Image (cartoon, grey):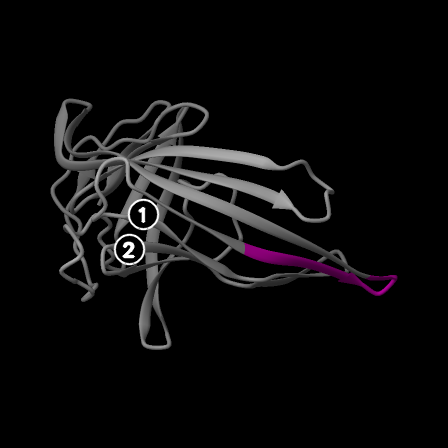
Amino acid sequence: MKKITISFVLLFTAIFFVACSDDSSDSTPDSTGDYWPTSVGNNWVYTKDGTDASATITGVKEINGTKYYAFNQLPIFRIFNDYTPLFIKKNKGDYYIKADEINKTYEGVTIKITGYEFPFFKDYLDVNETWEGTYTYTDTKTSNSSNPRIMETEVTYTGEILEKGVSLTVNGIVFNDVIKFRFSQIIDDKDDIWPTWDFTTDYWIAKDVGIIKFGYNGEYKSHVIK
């Protein structure tokens, strides 16, 4: 793997890049290139206000003959809990995010959160083209002193390609073949315990590099990419 150095302020971006390697054998005519290299050990470090958060591919999990690449965490998503096992799957230019089921016990309470999967990015769409859908997950909490509390959450998502084939300069380094896209999620607690949450993030993703910049409540830039 080769190294990339980047600097970052309120919108994740990359600064110096040579190339990330890729183990994925999933290439199809629909894909316009590899926008998220998936070799084990690939690492992206994002920084905001002097604090680093790394996204490292730690392993591969095969499900029904399909490879899913595991991350230690994905700081590009604000909504996920730190303990949620997250994976990426690539197929025909589609990039999917998968969250594994969670089973844990905390202070006598057993917690189960069902897994889910959704298409996060499509590299072959043209500017202004969109994709959308819905996924749900269930959070069940059980203790010895009460009946299980079950909360269902429905997430409606929309992705849109905003720019394509552009160049982006980050900390003096020019990245070519960059796609800017927007991913919005409306998160609805079906039991109305919490208000509906509308969450939108803009991403810049570079061919053979990965996500070099993103922003929701500010701008974040990649600090180091290896």
Q: Mark 1 points at which residue?
A: 121
Q: Does the magenta stretch include residue 145?
A: yes
Q: Name the residue under label 2.
A: 94
Residue 111 in the figure: left or right of residue 67? right
Q: Residue at x 36, y 24 (%)?
A: 219
The residue closer to the viewer here, 182 or 102, is 182
In the rendering, at what x and y percent does residue 106 appear? 70, 56
Q: In the displayed structure, would residue 181 be above or below residue 41?
A: above
- Magenta-colored span: 136-147
Label 1, secondary structure: give it: strand
Residue 135 in the figure: left or right of residue 88? right
Q: Which of marks 1 and 2 is nearer the N terminus?
A: 2
| Most distant residue in the right direction | 145
Label 2, secondary structure: give it: strand
Q: Which residue is drawn at 41% across and 33% down?
A: 201
Residue 101 in the figure: left or right of residue 205? right
Dot 1 and dot 2 residues touching (CB under 8 Å) = yes
Task: Answer with the quarter of the image where residue 3 lies.
Answer: top left
Amino acid on which the number 1 mark rests in the picture: Phe
In the rendering, at what x and y percent does residue 127 appear? 23, 36
Amino acid on which the number 2 mark rests in the picture: Asp
Look at the image and tell me whether residue 81 can be seen: no
Distance of mark 1 from mark 2, alpha carbons? 6 Å
Q: In which quarter of the image is the C terminus?
A: top left
In the rendering, at what x and y percent does residue 22 appear? 18, 58
Look at the image and tell me whether residue 21 can be seen: yes
| Most distant residue in the bottom direction | 64
Q: In the displayed structure, would residue 49 be above or below residue 59?
A: above
